[in-house]
Image (spheres, coloured by chain):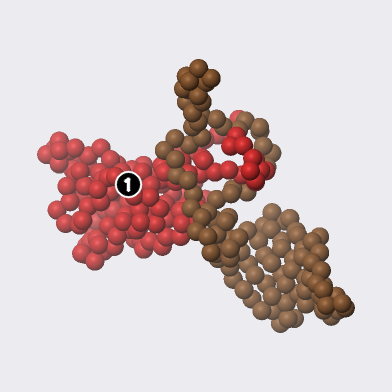
Chain colours: A brown, B red
Amino acid sequence: MKNFIDRVPVNPNRYKITGENSAITYVTIEREDNASVIGTALNREAFMALQGMEASDTVFNPDGSITETYSTGTVLTSFSANGDVVEKFTANSGQVITKTTKFNANGSISEVIS
Amino acid sequence: MSLTWGDFRWGLAYWDDVYLPDMVTDRTKDDVIAQNEKGFYNATDLNRVEIAAKYIAKLLTEAGYPVSVSTKTNWSKSDFPTENEMQRFIHNIQLLQNKFYHSEVQTPASMKWISYIEANNIEQILLYIEEMRRKMVAAYRYCGTMDCGGDVL
């Protein structure tokens, strides 16, 4: 387990520029790309969640499937008759990503993202 | 052009009663002598600090610094602040700092005989924590803006 902590700057996004003549300038640099999607922050919350440190509620459903609810969405794990394990994450925004785990006849395992 | 949220109060229900009130950090000796509103520590002061503590705890928890504070946000003139309640009140301030960032401003050891400076300190600490949280968020990097081994900018 890695304990990720955020940088807490007194002067966010401030950079020091040293010219070739050794002249020093301090500037604040911010993105001005008019992002239509801001993106996911790469912060403590995200990296700790990647290690499993994320609040969730897990329900074992009557049909044998499992529902895990996170603040960002829901993972539904279902077990197909052919032996496949299907994990479907539906984000609160509606985005869906699915991982299907197949246990092959030759003993290998295939994981398919769709 | 989008509007900036002002300090109006009608929208508080939208924020689930969790918001950062206008903190008071400018009490002076003259206020105490004049016995004006800032010269007393009232239920409104307790409520303001408790609401701010609840707000900051919520935002820190969302940022990956889980902190659970016990708050009472409906103090009234008829309430009697017990020693236990006031210890909890101060403990919240310490807890928020312990979980995130220690202010250089000194936390009062007790609410008993609290001075105007200590009353200012309590609210200044909360403002300081919130300021540092905002600066931390301002420095976040986002997916799609960085490459492994890439440049800083």
Q: How many marks can you see?
A: 1
Q: Residue at x 28, y 40 (%)?
A: B25
From the viewer's side, name the closer residue of B43 and A10: A10
| Residue appearing at x 53%, y 19% in the figure | A20
The answer to whether residue B102 is left or right of residue B40 is right
Q: Name the residue rendered at 42%, 60% in the picture.
A: B67
Give x and y (percent) for residue B57: 42, 55
The residue depicted at 63 percent of the width and 58 percent of the height is A72
What residue is disc 1 on?
Answer: B103
Q: In which quarter of the view is residue A99 placed? A: bottom right
Residue type at mark 1: give it: Ser
Q: Residue furthest front?
A: A21
Would you identify the image quadrant in which residue A80 lies? bottom right
Q: Nearer the viewer, residue B118 or B14?
A: B118
Q: Quadrant of the C terminus of chain A?
A: bottom right
Q: Which residue appears farthest toward the left when viewing the image?
A: B33
Report if residue B5 is visible in the image: yes
- Residue B47 visible? The answer is no
Left or right: B47 in relation to B9: left
In x, y percent, where is residue A76?
A: 71, 70
Secondary structure at badge 1 equals loop
Q: Nearer the viewer, residue B46 or B92?
A: B92
Disc 1 crowd rating (10 Å Cα; few below 14, some 14-19, many 20+) is: some
B77 vs B67, left or right, is left
